[in-house]
Image (cartoon, helix red, strand yellow):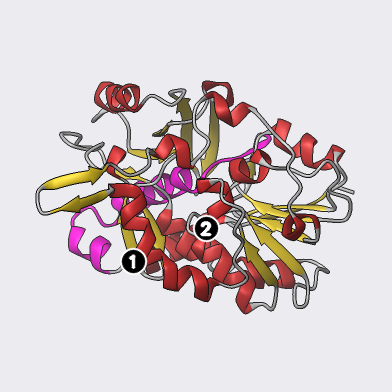
Amino acid sequence: MKHIVSVSLGSSKRDKSVEIELGGEKVLVERIGTDGSISLMKQKYGELDDKVDAFGIGGVNHALYVNGRAYPIPEVKNIGEGIKTKIFDGEGVKEVLEEKIAGFIENNSDITLKGKKGYMPSAVDRYSMASSLEKAGVGMWYGDFASALHLPIYLPSLKYIDFIAPKIIPVILNGIKIFNWKIWNGIPFEELYPTGKKQDKTKVKKIKQLENAEIIAGDCLYIKDNLPESLEGRIIITNTTTEEDFNLFKNRGASYLITTTPSIQGRSFGTNVMEAVLYSFISDKYKYNSNLITDAYPELIKTEAEQLGIKPEIKKLN
C-alpha cells in the first residue's frame, strides 16, 4: 500500500485520513494540520521521513507561481532541508488540471463560461486557473491586494498581475535591502493568507466586483474568507473542500461546486496531495530513469492523471 501524507500549515480541524484504490493499488492518504506552526511542520516531516512514499505541503506553497516565474516563500524555503522524501506543493497538478479547467467545464456540463462575470480573491495563488477562465471569455476581477494586503484595489485582467507581480511580490515576501542593510523585513506569510485557526472563520465584506460575480473561483480558504451571504445562482470553482464547505456553498444557494480534483469520501484533497499521489505512481514506473521523470515531468503527470482517473468534478448544488 502506498502512503501519502500532506502536512499543512492549516487548521487541524480539517484533518482527514482515507484509504482509496487507484490503478488497482490501495493508497492511504492523510492530511495533518499544524495550526499555523512551521516548526511543527518540520517536525512532522522529520518524524515521517523515509516512512511514506511522498509528502504534500498544504496551506502554503514552496513559491508563488506567476506567468512562468516562481517567487519562493521565505518561511518554507528550507522546509525540506535534510528530508529524503520528496515534498510537493501541487503546482505540477495545477499546471495540468487547473490550466484546462474551463475546457473541462464546457465539455462536461451545460455551463457556458463566455460572457460571464468572475471574481478570484487571489490570482497569484491560482494563476493557471485564472488564465484558463480568462481565455474562455470570463470577465475576471482579481482581489489580490484586498485579500493579502487588505487594500481596496481590484484588478480587471491578468495583464495587470503580470506587470505588477515582478515588482511587488519579491518586496512583499523578502522586504527591502540596501547594500547589506535590511530596512524592511516584508510581510509574514501568515498575514498574507489564512493559516491555522483563521481558516475556521468566514466574514462578509461588501465588494462590488464580488457581489456582481456569477463565478467565484480560486483558493477555497480565500473564497470563504469573504463569502457573500447569498450565493444564489453562482458557480464556485475551487479545491480542497470538506463536507462542511459543500454544505456551506449549498445552503447559501450556489448552483454548482466545481473542484479541480475529485471528491474522495466527502472531500476534495488539495493539489499537493494529488501531485504526491501521482508522483508515487510515476516513480514506481520510472525508478531506474530519474532523468526522464525530471525532463518529462509535466507530461508524465498529465498521463498518469488520465490513467488513474484523477480529474475535476462538477456537482450541481441547487
Q: Which mark is residue 126?
A: 2
For this rendering, which residue is in front, 94 or 9? 9
Q: Residue at x 35, y 65 (%)?
A: 167
Q: Indicate the quadrant where residue 3 lies.
A: top left
Residue type beneath disc 1: Arg
Q: Which residue is mark 1?
A: 69
Looking at the picture, how far across and down is residue 14, in whole percent? Answer: 58, 27
Residue type beneath disc 2: Arg
Q: Residue furthest left?
A: 180
For this rendering, which residue is in front, 37 or 93? 37
Q: Residue at x 55, y 24 (%)?
A: 197
Query: Can see residue 160?
Result: yes
Looking at the picture, how far across and down is residue 54, in whole percent? Answer: 33, 39
Magenta span includes 267: yes
Q: Residues within 10 Å of mark 2 (few under 14, many from 20)?
A: many
Q: Are marks 2 and 1 in contact (CB under 8 Å)?
A: no
Q: Residue at x 54, y 55 (%)?
A: 144
Q: Quadrant of the N terminus?
A: top left
Q: Where 10 falls versus 112 (above or below)? A: above
Q: Where 70 falls versus 56 (above or below)? A: below
Q: Indicate the quadrant where residue 52 lies.
A: top left
Mark closest to the chain's N terminus, 2 or 1: 1
| Main SS, magenta residues | helix
Query: Can see residue 289?
Result: no
